[in-house]
Amino acid sequence: MSIVIASDPTMTLAANAFMLMSIWKPIVLFAPFVGWAWMISTHLDKHAKRFFLGQEKWNAIHLAFGIAALVLIVALPVGGIAGFAAAFVGTLILLGLDILIFISITNKDERVPESQQMKMNMKDMAESRDAKKAAKMMGSSELTIVGANKMTIQPPQKDTPEFAVRVGAEQIVVKGYEAHASQIDILPANESTYAASYLVDGVRQAGDPIAAAEAIQMIDFWKKAAGLDTSDRRRKLTGEVSISGDSMSSATLKLNTSGSKSGMRMTMIFNPAEAVRRKVDALGLLEPQLDLLKDWANELEHTGGVVLLSAPSDNGRTTMSYSIMRLHDAYTSNIQSVEYEIEDALEGIKQIAWDSSADGPSFATTVRSTLRRDPDIVTICDLPDVETAQNIAAADLERTRVYLCLRTDAALKAIQTYVQAVGDPKLAAKGLRGVVASKLVRVLCGNCKVPYQPTPDMLKKLGLPQGKVGELFKKGGQVLVRNKPEVCSVCGGVGYSGQTGCFGVFPIGKEEKALIVEGDWNGLRAMMRKNGLPSVQQSALRKAVMGITSIEEVTRITTPPKSSSTSSKAKA
Ligand SMILES: [Zn+2]
């Protein structure tokens, strides 16, 4: 920087110095804001979005810190050098603190895989990225993949592009297997990138982003392996492959692929049949609830009637309906089911997969013709339209038991949904026998869960009796090995392992029916409470008191989901 000395040197210098001060001060004060805003827009915001960390909440927090820094500048006498320095340092501290808080909180969040945690050191970030790239380049094919034609798909020659695709496609599956995921999804994140995510015990965890071209090659690889038409990038295709490897027991992978304008998507489900194969007493029902269900199954000679099975998507509705069907004797009763997709073959049960093609019968027609054949028990996998409900209500419900699955998140809501769909409360109420509502909570990892004493205030909030609850448990994720904390090897640091159902089972008798006919929902709610049978929430709380799950899980399943994540047609 040069200062031109004019005719009166002292005057000009002083003036220039003053000018410089007044221009530089705002610029210097502004600089931390530029860096901070750049950091948020290029890193923090994307990080929050990618790992589902509550993007809006974090933006509000960033904004609050930004405003605090501005207020500080306005409040301090910036004209003087001391005030200016204080404002500058204060701004740096406030904005830096915002970023530090984001990094330290999100790094502890289990939704962020360890390899994806943010590091303050940019050099570290670059190094770990390079190391990952190098590892991928050197990757090897570890899995044996058996395709649709029962033939093993041989890995291509090393150093070919096909080999790299195969390694990438395998790595995604191996990662899902290691994380105990039940499902892997690969779908477009934006124009140039795809994102993989893993469903672990009903909670979604983000995986690494994949370049779009690479992701499409991987999807095509799996499609080809399953014998699907890789040129069909739009329609929903379903296939299956078997995989096994040195570090992995053999597994069946079911593939669902489909496409839209934004790109292709693929869902891979690990061992789909096993996932729905559970005995009814392993579902998580409390004893009186299980007894009630068994009673309903055994009274069949006298009564049919509709039992509503309610659970939100991904909350084990199919598993519940399969287990309840198995309460009935398939050799002495005629049991049938109408399903979108047969997830597991049930012995002795006639499972009808609805033909969803355009020229096939509608779902409601399939249900009607099934009911006309006078089966003893029919399970219907969904209520997609009012016609289906009307066909059920019009069936001979004195004779036939119908288990109807609904994507609702509470028992009362299930009753309302069914009654409204039938359109005639009297007819709907007449055929109702009961309702079973369910949601899944994650089971605390027995190896690392952490006991704690709940405060009286906390017990009061939860509606738990004082003095009767000794200790509760929360997730750990770490264990002490020779007095040093290490990541728990059982749950991989997640703190949970497996899921269990929390149920509400309610009979619908004469009094309940009268309230339904009157449309007195508040009265019905009160009646269901009066019966003393635990609701889904109460069952979940009992499981927390028993040390099976955490209060955080109870809160997670009883807090209504944000509307953005609800999809009415999502898979059960
Ligand atoms: Zn653990």
Image (cartoon, rainbow, N blue to C red):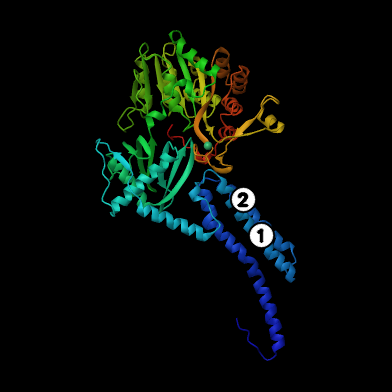
Q: Which residue is disc 2 drawn over? A: 60
Q: Nearer the viewer, residue 531 or 115?
A: 115
Q: Residue furthest top?
A: 302
Q: Position of residue 481 (x, y in %)?
A: 55, 41
Q: Nearer the viewer, residue 55 or 548?
A: 548
Label ID, residue 529: none
Label ID, residue 93: 1
Q: Nearer the viewer, residue 421 or 219?
A: 219
**Callout 1, which amino acid?**
Ile
Q: Position of residue 340 (x, y in %)?
A: 37, 29
Residue drawn at (61%, 62%), measured in percent from left and top?
33
Indicate which label's residue lies in the foreground, 1 or 2: 1
**Callout 2, which amino acid?**
Ala
For residue 127, above or below residue 114:
below
Kindly tell me whether residue 389 is visible in this rendering.
no
Mark 2, other Cα within 10 Å: few <14 / some 14–19 / many ≥20: few
For residue 30, above or below residue 298:
below
- Tell me the quarter of the image containing the N terminus: bottom right
- Asked if residue 231 lies left or right of residue 570, the reply is left
- Asked if residue 202 lies left or right of residue 370, the reply is right
Mark 1, other Cα within 10 Å: few <14 / some 14–19 / many ≥20: some
Q: Position of residue 64 (x, y in %)?
A: 65, 53
Q: Earlier in the sequence, mark 1 or mark 2?
A: 2
Is label 2 in a helix, a strand or a loop?
A: helix
Q: Position of residue 273 (x, y in %)?
A: 37, 29
Q: CA distance from mark 1 to mark 2?
A: 18 Å
Is label 1 in a helix, a strand or a loop?
A: helix
Residue drawn at (55%, 48%), measured in percent from left and top?
107
- Tell me the quarter of the image containing the C terminus: top left
